[in-house]
Image (spheres, grey):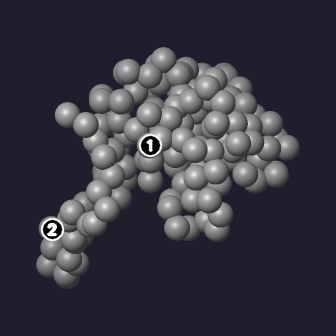
Amino acid sequence: GKLARASEALVVYRSHEDQQSRGVPKEAIWDLRVSALQRTLLPKLPSFSIWSAGRDGKRFYRSLSQENRRKVVAFLDVDPGKLAAGQYYDKETKVHVPIVPWTSAGEARFQPTIICVKRGLHAGFEENLASLSLTEGQHFWYFL
């Protein structure tokens, strides 16, 4: 099979007070999503980068198995402060992971990229991503 982005909504969620999913902790949903990614996509990737050196990107990184953490070549970010820091230190594995400019996602050595940035939340994110002419499902995947 082949995955493709649909132009219209395929599923519409309706929220109400009695729905069962209200009782599912968001941490459980996060863990299930990470587990699915580690089972399906990440075994196929020899290396990858994570777009976001912020809270969500670091949380995603820390949620990975040590085997998959070793595959992370860099964090990509737009924040000058994070770029000035230059790296993220993983205390558990004692590894320094570089933090590089988001434009590096266009370079083969930083591909593919797992995007941990919420769409529509950060001004300019979609435009930045589009400017790189990357293909979803080949050069990048959204996690959030």
Q: Nearer the viewer, residue 71 or 26?
A: 71
Q: Nearer the viewer, residue 3 or 74?
A: 3
The residue depicted at 50 percent of the width and 61 percent of the height is 119
Q: Is residue 137 above or below residue 143?
A: above
Q: Which label is found at residue 20? A: 2
Can you give x and y, in whole percent of width and height, for residue 137 in the image?
A: 40, 38
Element under label 1? loop
Q: Which kind of residue does numbered mark 2 sit on?
A: Gln
Q: Check disc 1 and report the residue beneath it.
A: 136
Residue 39: name its quadrant. Answer: top left
Circle 1/circle 2 CB separation < 8 Å: no
Q: Nearer the viewer, residue 12 or 32?
A: 12
Can you give x and y, in whole percent of width and height, for residue 87 in the image?
A: 75, 34
Residue pushed farthest right? 84
Can you give x and y, in whole percent of width and height, for residue 67 in the image?
A: 46, 19
The residue depicted at 82 percent of the width and 52 percent of the height is 80
Among the two numbered marks 1 and 2 on one chain, the one whose residue lies closer to the N terminus: 2
* 99 sits left or right of 116 in the view: right
* 50 sits left or right of 94 in the view: left
